[in-house]
Image (cartoon, grey):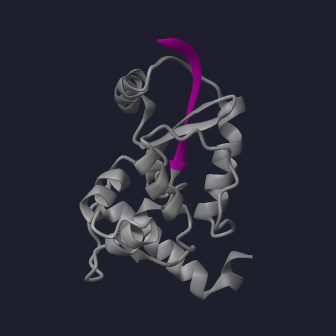
């Protein structure tokens, strides 16, 4: 198992504290909650993916990510321009790529995503991949809803999903507000 320095830091967002984990090559994870609560699960996730993390509080690496998150929450950023270190199965990565293509302020159903990746019967697998997205908000899994239009499941909690969708829909309808 390779030992790797993983920088972390916290960001106080409108939906609560976010813990960010990144290396010199990009961001690995965005977790809901304070680092004290998040790091044990993150350590297990890294180990499962054959990385022995050496966590270091380092805002030099984390600050550029925070800047983009602040811009997003202030309605000034619709797309993230970050180097992503995606760890997942080939299927999960295909799903996450599809999520990244959902336009700001819009939603898609799990079925839409399944059709988009040419796996129209894989709706449940899409939900599972969505649930395992290590970079919520940045890879917008909150933009996926039920086929009936209902808001369903979100790792951070439904209140956060509702907030993110509302934020994006308001800024998409009133782009002048964000300038």
Is residue 11 one of those drawn in magenta?
Answer: yes
The residue lying at 46 percent from left, 12 percent from top is 1
The residue lying at 57 percent from left, 17 percent from top is 4
Residue 22: percent from left, percent from top: 59, 33
Q: Is residue 34 in view?
A: yes
State which region is magenta. 1-12
* 116 with respect to 79 (left or right): left
Q: Is residue 163 in view?
A: no
Assign the magenta stretch its main secondary structure: strand
Residue 126: percent from left, percent from top: 33, 59
179 up-or-down from 163: above or below: below
The residue lying at 51 percent from left, 73 percent from top is 167
Residue 109: percent from left, percent from top: 35, 74
Residue 30: percent from left, percent from top: 49, 43
Q: Residue furthest bottom?
A: 173
Count of numbered tags: 0
- Toward the viewer: 168 or 89? 89
Q: Quick one: quadrant of the C terminus?
A: bottom right
Is residue 121 one of those drawn in magenta?
Answer: no
């Amino acid at each position: 198992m390779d030992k790797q320095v993983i920088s972390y830091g916290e960001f106080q967002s409108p939906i609560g504290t976010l813990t960010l984990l990144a290396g010199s090559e990009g961001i690995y994870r965005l977790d809901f909650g304070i680092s004290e609560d998040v790091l044990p699960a993150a350590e297990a996730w890294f180990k499962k993916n054959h990385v022995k993390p050496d966590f270091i509080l380092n805002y030099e690496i984390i600050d550029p990510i925070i800047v983009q998150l602040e811009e997003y929450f202030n309605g000034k950023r619709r797309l993230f321009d970050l180097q992503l270190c995606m760890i997942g199965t080939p299927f999960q990565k295909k799903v996450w790529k599809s999520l990244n293509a959902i336009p700001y302020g819009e939603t898609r159903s799990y079925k839409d995503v399944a059709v988009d990746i040419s796996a129209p019967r894989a709706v449940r697998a899409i939900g599972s991949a969505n649930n395992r997205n290590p970079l919520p908000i940045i890879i917008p899994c909150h933009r996926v809803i039920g086929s009936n239009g209902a808001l369903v499941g979100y790792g951070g909690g439904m209140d956060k999903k509702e907030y993110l969708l509302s934020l994006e829909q308001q800024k998409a309808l009133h782009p002048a507000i964000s300038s």
